[in-house]
Image (cartoon, rainbow, N blue to C red):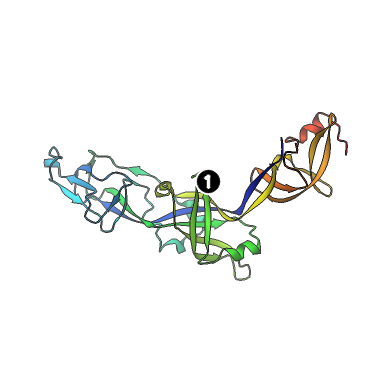
Amino acid sequence: MPAKRGEIEQGVGSEGVIIRDEMVYLSPTGGTLRLVAPEKSRARTDTTIAQVVPGETQRRTEDNTGVRLVPEKPGVVSFTVDGLERILTPSSWVDFDAKKVSELVSNPVSVKSGMQVETGRTLFRVIDNYRVYVLVFPEPGITPSVSRVLTEGRKCTLRFDSVPGRLCSAKIVSRVDSTRDDPKPSALLLELTDYPHELYYLRHVHAKIITGTQRGIIIPKQALVKGKDGYLVYIPANLGVDSKPVTVIAGDESQVMCEGLREGQRVVVNPYVVHEAGITVWR
């Protein structure tokens, strides 16, 4: 496989949870539910989102009979709730560490137009789409230089595994350090400044906080061979292979960036085959 020129994102992996400023609305009475506003539509304080028609008039759902439900604050409408809306809030995040967050169970439930509802049944939520947060717990091993970058007020870029092909910008609102003697972030509260609609529904997430981008010559990670004095790769040559030392300057889960190779230079992607098949290593 030829080495190619490309880029590798450097950053910090983290497990996290989405926290939204959202208000949940319950049915004020029993009856037939009629949904008025579309899912993911933006509602004003005078927008009718849903209507509950009492049992004795449930057949007259086309007129104005029934209880109209309007939001107290404007926002984005969703008829799917997961039961964590009142537990995870922008003010309650300080009560959660990585263990407590991992124990939270998200159980999404949706309502549909025409269904019978009882008094107190959860019907929908209205999300303040200007206040969406993610509480992240960075993986261990953060270098001091990266730790100094992850400070309150700094802007950063996130990549969510569950939202492929999309970068999200954010601002670090708050930081909790591991200990006073080990000032590395154990938790970060990030306020998203732009985000895809998937975050209206996601709860538990894995995110990478991107701290920089390296550009250079890239090869697959499995092409590396650990030698006595560092890393090397095998290059096809004269019915055998040459061993060529390389210096790894960056990497991610699947590829590494190396010095010591030219663009287009072919490397053996599965170096273990060289020894299993008895291929000659010239040097």
Determine if residue 220 is in view. no
Name the residue located 19 percent from the left edge and 46 percent from the top edge. 52
* Picture quarter with the C terminus: top right
Q: Is residue 197 left or right of residue 15?
A: left
Looking at the figure, which quarter contains the N terminus? top right
Q: Of 68 and 171, which appears nearest the observer?
A: 171
Front residue of this view, candidates 100 and 182: 182
Q: Quadrant of residue 57?
A: top left
Point out residue 271 in the picture as x, y percentages from the top left corner: 77, 36
Q: Is residue 87 left or right of residue 97?
A: left
Looking at the picture, does residue 72 appear above or below residue 263?
below
For image coordinates 73% across by 39% down, the residue present is 223
Q: Is residue 181 left or right of residue 240?
A: left
Helix, strand or loop under label 1: loop
Image quadrant of residue 233?
Answer: top right
Q: Amino acid at mark 1?
A: Asp
Whole-percent x and y of residue 215? 66, 50
Question: Would you say residue 54 is visible in this rendering?
Answer: yes
Q: State the residue position of label 1.
A: 161
- Count the marks: how many? 1
**Relative height, residue 222 to residue 213 (above, below):** above
